[in-house]
Structure formats: C-alpha cells, structure tokens
Amino acid sequence: MCELYIVGMGRGDRPSLQVLEQERFSAVRHCLLYGATKMLKDYLRERGWEISNLEEFQAQKANKSLWEQEKEVAGIIPEFLKETGSALLLLPGRPWPGMSLLKHIRSMALSSAGFQVEIMAGEDLWGPVMDCLAGKEIQADLSRGTILLDAASLEMLRQPSPGELLIGHIWGGFMLAPLVKRLLRFFPAEHKVHLLFFQEEGCLGKPYQCALGSLESIEKVPHGWCFLRVPPSRGYLLGDMLHMMEELRSPGGCPWDRQQDHFSLRPYLLEETYEVLSAINEGNPQELCEELGDLLLQIVFHSQLAVERNDFSLWQVIDGITAKIYRRHPHVFQQESAGTPGEVSRRWQEIKSKEKGKGSRPHLEVPDEFPALMKAQKIQKKAADLGFDWPEIEGALQKVPEELEELHAAFLSGNRGKVEEELGDLFFSLVNVARFLGVDSESALENTVEKFRRRFRYIEKQVQGSGKDYAAFTLDELDRWWKEAKECEKEGKGSFQDEKDS
C-alpha cells in the first residue's frame, strides 16, 4: 500500500523543520511541495530529498478555475505514488480541513485502494494572522466576525462578507489574478486590502496594503505562507436592508411604514415595476440601478410583513426561487441535455406540472391582474403548449382580416356590444400573430404609443412656435408636420431626437 504523509510545516522556520527528522520518514526520499520557502527547499536538497514542485504544475493551468486546477494537481498524486511507493506532501501551517487540495486528496484516497493518507498537524497560522489583524498596524474591527477561506475555494463566496474576509493558501503570484477577478464582483477596484506573509525566520512581516485592483500586479508572493485580508465593504448589504425595514416597522419607527399591509402596497409595487421597464427602455444603467433598488425595497417590505405574521421570510423567498431554478434547469445543473430554447421551455413545463400536480389548476390560468395584452399572449401560449394552435403562422395571419371584416359588419349594424366583442377578437388575433413572430405584444404597443407621443411633440413645438392655437391649423397642416417628424426620425436629426427629453 502506497503512503502519502501530509505534513504541516507551521511557520516554515528552522524549528518547524525538525518534524522531518522523524524516524518514520527515514525511508521516504520524495517530497511534494505546494508552497515552500527557499530555506525549506535548500534544507531538503542538502539531505538528498527529491523535490517535485506542485505549484509549477498548477501555474500552467491558469485557463481553469483554481478549484479545477487543484483537483488536477491532486489527480497526479496517485500515479506519482505508484512510482515512488511513498512521499511527503509539505504544506504551510496546519493542514486545514477546509483546504481544497486536502479535500481532493482525501476523496481520491477514499475512492481508491491505491494509497492511504496520514496527516501530521503543524502549528496553526490562522491564529497569528488574526492577532495581526487586531494589532496596531491594521486595527481591524472583528466584532462582525471573520470568514476564513481557502484561496482555491473562493468561488464558494457568493456574496460580500459582513465582516473580515481572510484568504489563505495562496501558493504563488499566479493565483492573484483569479482572486482579484472574483473579489471585484463584490468590492470596488479601489477597495484597500492587506497581504500578510510569514518570513523565513517564522514571524509575520509588515502588512502590505494596496488597492484590490492593483493586487495582481504584484510579481513576487511568498509561496504558501501568504494571506490576503479583505475588510468588509462600507456599502450596505441585503441584511442591512432587512434590518432597516424592521426598524421602520417597529413601534418607534415610521408611522407611514407601520400603517402599510400587502394590499396597500400593491400600487407601489406596480409603479416601481413600470419605472424599471422605463429605465430599461431608456438604456440608462444608472437609472436602472436606482429603479431596481426601489423594486427590491418593495420585495423586502412585503417579506417583512410576512415575517411579522410568521408566514415566511425573505431568506425563504430567496431559497425557494433558487431551488426552483435549479430544479427546472436539469440541462444546466444535472446531466440532461437541451439543444433549443423550445426544448428548454417544454422541459420547464413538464417539471412545473409535475411539481404542482396534474389537474390541480386549470391549464389556462393566469393572474387576473395581468394587462389584457399580456394575459392574451400568456393564455395563447399555454393553449399552444397543449397542441391547440395553428400549425403555421399563415393561419394566424388569415384570421386578422377575417376579424376586421366582422368588426366592420358589427359597426354597420349599430350594435355597440357586438362592436366591442369583435374589436376584442381583432386584438386577440393580432396578439396571436405577435406570439408567432416572437414579439411581446405589450412591449410592441408600448413602443408604438411612445413613438406617437414622440412625433406629436414635434407638432406641438411647431404650434407653440407659431404663437397660435391648434384650432388655427387644418388637419392637412398638422399632418404635414407629422410627416416631417417621421422624416427627421428616420434621418436621426439631432433637433428632433432632442425633443424626446424636452
């Protein structure tokens, strides 16, 4: 049976090397190094040990995530042991259960009878680093907690840390670029961070401070004995938003917020939704960011109301929707395949029906609160999914003039109720054409309304410039300005485009 001894090298100083002089290692001549100082390498060579530098292998796999790189590094160990029989894997500090490399090696050892693992702990380094954080040079506020994270496991970080973030096992400078790329999801490039590293004599060096965005430009990183300290962001987090809403709803909070319930907030939810859509249409990222925040506030508000009634919390809302998306995308998160959007949609409906139970709800059920065009398009799609649909778009197109003719006949009959019915049928048939064309009918009509309003502003400007009233102009004169507005719009003339925001 091949043996792999995983030995913690503590601070990497001279006293820490004594562990290698144990009798049990006398027959072992091969060392795997994953983060090592020059002193350690010199020590091993002087005593005739054969050295293999694993970080060099990992550095050649920079196109993959750090987690995948370390998995590949662990994958070469079984073959290495078949040739050597036994070997030492020397790691900084105390081999930590949260270390990704250790997890990969243990998993391989358990799934294969090819080798066994023995772990020998060295001095833990997290403690001294934590003392450094609280020391005079950094004076970190540890009251909000600290997250200890292995560098290769940074992809597990899905949200900003409310307290200190301490990242260890940075084997070399090649790891900094992917670390920075991940952290920039949560922190601005100018966010100040500290690099902490143990010197060869075993003590921590002076903390090196720099901006997060410039971290990857550092050329030399002490292998293995390096830690990255990322202080919490000064910005607010989702938990802060929840706390704020709880305070607003408290007995000493805001009288208006305390008065609200789910029903009274409905108009604001709808209003904020439309303002988000407006920001999207305008193509203004800053405006969209603000409006999404306003919409999020409504979700937080409703969740707080639910918490007070012991119904559910925002965390349950997040958990529920995340779990649902995982379940309904087996082609992404499981082993299924889906080649087209249509296949994805059909599989989604199958899973949804199975979750809700067949026959539990009418097939064509949609919320009554939907706008009429949206409701029509949703119902038509549901019917089509059940096979009730024109085989080709020609059937839907032919229905439009047919409904228009019926509307004309109803108009001639003078029956107002029939006119309204036939007009509804015409709208419904047009929505069906939009569905076949892959066009959202609600958005299409909204864009046309905005286009009409935009062109009419041009007419309005001409009328105002004349100093007269609308009644002073004939329809032909107004229509001439309308046609001018169309031509200006087609040519993209600045004088007309500016009128959109006037």
Image (cartoon, rainbow, N blue to C red):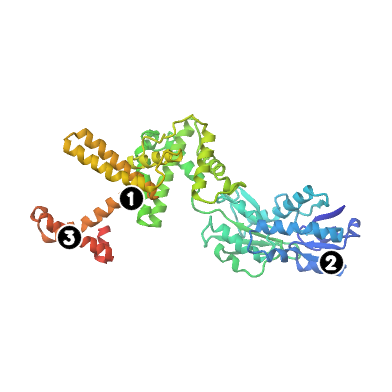
Label 2, on which residue? 50
> Is 123 situated above or below 384?
below
Q: Is residue 272 left or right of residue 329?
A: left
Could you tell me how many numbered marks the image carries?
Answer: 3
Q: Mark 2 or mark 1: which comes first in sequence?
A: 2
Q: Mark 1 or mark 3: which comes first in sequence?
A: 1
Mark 1, secondary structure of its residue: helix
- x%, y% of residue 441? 34, 47
Label 3, on which residue? 481
Q: Residues within 10 Å of mark 3 (few under 14, many from 20)?
A: some
Mark 3, secondary structure of its residue: helix
Residue 440 visible in image: no
Q: Is residue 357 left or right of residue 154?
A: left
Residue 319: which quarter of the image?
top right
State the residue in front, 83 or 412. 412
Tell me the amino acid under the disc marked 1.
Ala
Residues at marks 1 and 3, CA–CA distance in whole angstroms: 24 Å
Label 1, on which residue? 444
Tell me the amino acid under the disc marked 3.
Trp
Q: Nearer the viewer, mark 3 or mark 2?
A: 3
